[in-house]
Each structure stands twice: as C-alpha cells, then as structure tokens.
Image: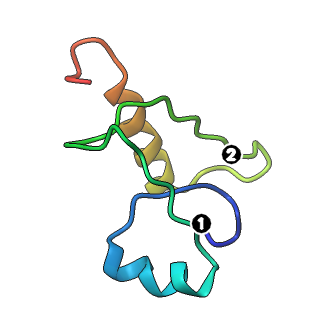
Amino acid sequence: IEAGLGWGWQPRALVQPRIEAGSLVEMPFDNLSNGVALWVDVVWSKERPLGLGARRFVQLIAQQGRPGSGA
C-alpha cells in the first residue's frame, strides 16, 4: 500500500503511525457499517505468474461475486 499499489482495510493501531507520518492516507467512507460492497479489480502480470497464496486469494475474491455465494 505504501508503494502506491492499492488500498487496504487495516487495523488502526497498525496504520496510525504511518498516517501521522504521511506515508498512508485515510480514506473515510460513509457506507461502512458492517462491511463494504464494491467491485474489486485484481490485476497481475502474465510474465510473473501468481504463487499459490495469490491464486487462492483471487479464487476467494471471485467466489464472493458469484450468484448464491452470499455476496
């Protein structure tokens, strides 16, 4: 995230020092009560295949958007 490659939902205790230092910026949302419903694009290079953990992460994200998945 600090490299400018995306955004994340992190525990405040973890990121507060970085917010104060200016290396991270907080993005407040009005619709956060129990979760966020939004589209997520996952992008990677064909020249650098995803590892097992990243492939599983992509599968989990994809399952959340399928009908009947509870999304």
Q: Which mark is residue 10?
A: none
Residue 69 versus residue 31 in the image, above or below: above
The secondary element bearing badge 2 is classed as loop
The secondary element bearing badge 1 is classed as loop
Q: Is the Cβ of the residue at disc 1 closer than 8 Å to that at disc 2?
A: no
Q: Residue drawn at (22%, 43%), measured in percent from left and top? A: 33
Residue at the disc numbered 1 = 1
Alpha carbons under labels 1 and 2: distance apart: 15 Å
* Image coords of residue 45 (percent x, y): 75, 46
Badge 2 amino acid: Trp
Number of the front mark, 1 or 2: 1
Please identify the quarter of the rendering in which residue 1 is found: bottom right
* Image coords of residue 12 (percent x, y): 34, 74
Crowd around label 2: few <14 · some 14–19 · many ≥20 (10 Å):
few
Q: Residue drawn at (43%, 81%), measured in percent from left and top? A: 16
Q: Earlier in the sequence, mark 1 or mark 2?
A: 1
* Image coords of residue 65 (percent x, y): 37, 23
Residue 10 versus residue 36 in the image, above or below: below
Badge 1 amino acid: Ile
Going by the image, does 12 lie left or right of 5? left
* Image coords of residue 32 (percent x, y): 30, 43
Q: Who is closer to the viewer here, 66 or 18?
A: 18
Residue at the disc numbered 2 = 44
Going by the image, does 32 lie left or right of 2? left
Q: Who is closer to the viewer here, 44 or 48?
A: 44
Going by the image, does 64 lie left or right of 7? left
Please identify the quarter of the rendering in which residue 44 is found: top right
Q: Who is closer to the viewer here, 7 or 26?
A: 26
Q: Residue drawn at (58%, 72%), measured in percent from left and top? A: 24
Give the mark count.
Answer: 2
Residue 67 versus residue 55 in the image, above or below: above
The quadrant of the picture occupied by the C terminus is top left
